[in-house]
Image (cartoon, rainbow, N blue to C red):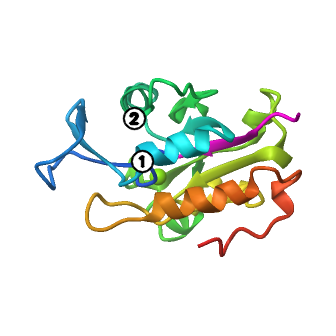
Amino acid sequence: MTAPILLILDLDETLIHATAAKIREDFDFQVYHYYIYKRPGLTDFLIRCGAHFTLAVWSSASDDYVRAVVGQIFPATLTPAFVWGRSRCTRFRLPELDEQGFASLDYATSYEFAKRLKKVTRRGFDLKRTLIVDDTPEKVTQNYGNAIYIKPYLGMGEDRELAYLADYLLTLKDEANVRTIEKRHWR
Ligand SMILES: [Mg+2]
């Protein structure tokens, strides 16, 4: 039997919403000064996907924040293959900001952090059997064959996105090469 597909999950606005300004009293937990709201269906999503995929987390947030959040949201029965933060991302300038002359104004908004899957292949994973889920296409722009985009979760309202996504992902679990499958219109 072949190894399960590697499913790399983003954190912020994909699995959770974190905010320094409380938006509802019923936050799930706190990390540093952030109030964390789990996306509806999060635990079910992780359990359903964890049964058929090798799970991993890759966020462009700081490494210690990422580890703290993952420690709170993953069920004890699931261990991610890796938990990566910003130190594993590749920083690049946003060309449209450069063109507008903004790049030198504000360091934080002049750069984007990309998740380059080459770092995953160095760990021995096969890109034909790797999926990466993110709410920000810019962060996975070089990985279009592996990427699945999810609507951002901002901590409020009805949200069934993770349940829909789990249904879709399970249709891919036995694919020999996920890169050849059109995934843009998965919803
Ligand atoms: Mg995100």
Residue under pointer 1: 42
Tally of marks: 2
Which image quarter: residue 62? top left
Which residue is located at x 65 percent, y 56 percent?
169
Give 71 or 61, whichever is nearer the viewer.
Answer: 71
Amino acid type assigned to the residue bearing label 2 in the image = Ile
Q: Is residue 122 visible?
A: yes
Which image quarter: residue 29? top left
Q: Residue furthest bottom?
A: 185
Q: Which residues are magenta?
A: 1-10
Which residue is located at x 64 percent, y 27 percent?
81
Callout 2 secondary element: helix
The reply to whether the magenta stretch includes residue 5 is yes
Residue under pointer 2: 73
Amino acid type assigned to the residue bearing label 1 in the image = Leu
Quarter holding the N terminus is: top right
